[in-house]
Image (tube, helix red, strand yellow):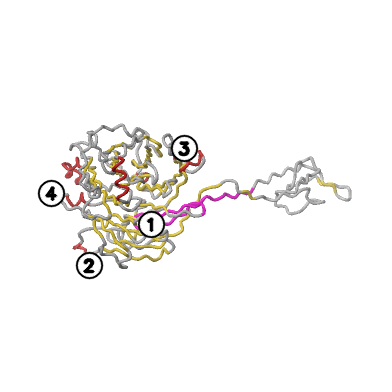
């Protein structure tokens, strides 16, 4: 999975990488036992920036919280030097940086529709002049934020002591009493004390002994988040995805039926590049579920549908890209169709690998890895919820079957991860010959629920490119480790650090971080 046949041959010769041993790193917003979680505090999105030094989370209350990495700063030097010095014991650490209210609840009076403030997606943009930029969106409105450190300017206190009144020039007064007597030319004197801070504009005879001017100091710094642009009124349906382009100038936003292309500098105009809305809405058979730009090719993007297909489109072909350049879908086995077939085939998330060679998709039952050069079928399939197949009817009744789980790939492309129920998440090795299938719990002891279950052996064909792997299926009626299942606790959102084996995942209002 390194972008070419040479890489695959080399990795195959070296053998599959050894399974990682995951350790707890940090938790933010940990719940006390029995503490009730407020709906607005539940995390709805997690996103690392490209450097991996910043992490952003959004919640259902419309807030965006930023974290920054501290272990690289505290030990000095850049991350590459640290990796050379201490590859094993280095412990990735983040700290709270700032938070701001990104979206507020709104009401669409034309449609009599409430627009909730929940953050659906966050995407980091290019940094400039020490400031970080990011896009955040709720169901209808996208906002472009700039977060920057600014020095807080304060006026230094003017301490007036007539006994030690020294001006800015450093001239001391000869008076040593706060109530000095002021003599006049005729020998008389005034016993009235002079208060230099009073509103009386009269000056004492002989002038002031010293003059202190207010001094502006800027010592402390504070982080200020400012909304630079608002991209609104372009979507009739709920926005499910935003993705910024590798050109650094444009981004896309996708709802159920349309994908729009925006320029970051222009907020009042967007171009509709994909429109799957039929003339008659009764003919609607599928909707767009997720969309993402290629990481390096600015003209290529992929979007997934509720029918389990992924379409690759090329912006150079035409202005309206309703016709795709490639489609990735897996044909269903004959006789396997049921009432739930289309529901569980719906793709909830699609991600490009860092080199753009592979695509990872997540449907309700499994993860699928696709080679963008091979549209005949996935190169690997990882079973996540196969043991829930007998319970699909119950899952439909309680709406759990419509849960949208996210997926992510490691920076080196050797592993994939996704969430499950009971606050569990699964990690699979996708290198040739790998049988790695790890189940972890979002808690301070991630291996607590870990039981060594023999993964199904991979079925490799003669060509490594067309290999098909199916792993991770366990006995039905239990979760990944034979425990009873809790559908109320679900781990929907997680993100893999772009350059090292570190994962951030959300369990309700808590952000857990792990490293290997």
Distance of mark 1 from mark 2, alpha carbons? 30 Å
Q: CA distance from mark 1 to mark 4?
A: 39 Å
Q: Position of residue 162 (x, y in %)?
A: 75, 43
Measure how far apart labels 3 and 1 are at the Cα level.
34 Å
Residue with the mark numbered 1: 244
Q: Residue furthest right?
A: 186
- Name the front one of labels 3 and 2: 3
User: Sequence order check: which comes first, mark 2 or mark 4?
Assistant: 2
Q: Read off the residue under disc 2.
A: 279
Looking at the rendered structure, the secondary structure element under dot 3 is: helix
Q: Nearer the viewer, mark 2 or mark 4?
A: 4
User: Could you tell whether 447 is left or right of 134 in the image?
Assistant: left
Name the N-terminal-most of marks 3 and 2: 3
- Is there CB contact under 8 Å for labels 3 and 1? no
Which is nearer the N-term, disc 3 or disc 1? 3
Dots 1 and 2: beta carbons under 8 Å?
no
Work out whether mark 3 precedes mark 4 in sequence or the reverse, and give the earlier one.
3
Question: What SS does tag 4 mark?
Answer: loop
Q: Quadrant of the C terminus?
A: top left
The disc at residue 336 is 4
Count of numbered circles in the view: 4
Place of residue 172 in the rendered image (x, y in percent of width and height, measured from the top left): 78, 44
Comparing marks 3 and 1, which lies closer to the viewer?
3
Callout 1: SS: strand
Per the rendered image, the range of residues in magenta is 129-155
Are there few (<14), some (14-19), or many (20+) residues within 10 Å of tag 3?
A: few
Residue 290's quadrant in the figure? bottom left
- The label on residue 469 is none
Residue picked out by circle 3: 85
* Quadrant in the rendering for residue 489: top left
């Amino acid at each position: 999975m390194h972008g070419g046949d040479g890489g695959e041959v080399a990795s195959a010769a070296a053998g599959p990488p050894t399974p990682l041993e995951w350790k707890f790193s940090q938790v933010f917003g940990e719940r006390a036992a029995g503490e009730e979680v407020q709906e607005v505090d539940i995390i709805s999105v997690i996103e690392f920036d490209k450097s991996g030094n910043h992490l952003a989370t959004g919640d259902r209350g419309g807030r965006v919280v930023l974290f920054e990495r501290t272990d690289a700063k505290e030990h000095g030097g850049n991350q590459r030097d640290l990796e050379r010095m201490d590859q094993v014991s280095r412990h990735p650490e983040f700290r709270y940086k700032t938070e701001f209210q990104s979206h507020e609840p709104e009401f669409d009076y034309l449609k009599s529709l409430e627009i909730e403030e929940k953050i659906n997606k966050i995407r980091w943009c290019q940094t400039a002049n020490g400031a970080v930029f990011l896009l955040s969106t709720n169901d209808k409105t996208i906002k472009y934020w700039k977060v920057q450190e600014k020095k807080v300017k304060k006026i230094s206190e003017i301490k007036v002591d007539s006994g030690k009144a020294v001006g800015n020039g450093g001239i001391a007064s000869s008076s040593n009493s706060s109530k000095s007597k002021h003599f006049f030319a005729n020998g008389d004197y005034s016993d009235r004390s002079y208060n230099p801070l009073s509103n009386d504009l009269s000056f004492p005879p002989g002038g002031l002994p010293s003059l202190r001017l207010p001094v502006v100091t800027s010592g402390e710094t504070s982080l200020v988040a400012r909304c630079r642009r608002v991209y609104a009124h372009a979507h009739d349906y709920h926005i499910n995805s935003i993705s910024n382009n590798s050109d650094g100038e444009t981004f896309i936003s996708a709802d159920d039926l349309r994908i729009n292309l925006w320029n970051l500098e222009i907020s009042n105009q967007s171009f509709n590049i994909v429109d799957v809305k039929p003339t008659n809405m009764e003919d609607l058979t599928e909707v767009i579920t997720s969309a993402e730009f290629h990481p390096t090719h600015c003209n290529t993007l992929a979007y997934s549908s509720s029918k389990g297909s992924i379409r690759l489109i090329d912006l150079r072909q035409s202005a309206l890209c309703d016709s795709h350049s490639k489609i990735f879908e897996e044909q269903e086995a004959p006789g396997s169709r049921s009432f739930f077939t289309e529901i569980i085939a719906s793709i909830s998330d699609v991600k490009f690998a860092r080199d753009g060679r592979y695509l990872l998709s997540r449907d309700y039952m499994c993860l699928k890895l696709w080679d963008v050069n091979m549209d005949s079928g996935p190169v690997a399939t990882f079973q996540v919820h196969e043991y829930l197949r007998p319970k699909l009817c119950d899952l439909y009744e309680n709406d759990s079957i419509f849960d949208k789980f996210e997926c992510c790939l490691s920076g080196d492309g050797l592993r994939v991860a996704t969430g499950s129920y009971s606050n569990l998440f699964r990690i699979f090795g996708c290198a040739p010959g790998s049988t790695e299938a790890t189940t972890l719990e979002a808690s301070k002891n991630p291996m607590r629920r870990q039981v060594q279950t023999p993964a199904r052996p991979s079925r490799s064909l003669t060509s490594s490119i067309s290999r098909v792997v199916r792993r991770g299926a366990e006995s039905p009626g239990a979760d990944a480790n034979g425990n009873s299942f809790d559908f109320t606790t679900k781990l929907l959102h997680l993100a893999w650090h772009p350059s090292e084996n570190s994962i951030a995942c959300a369990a309700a209002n808590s952000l857990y971080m792990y490293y290997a």
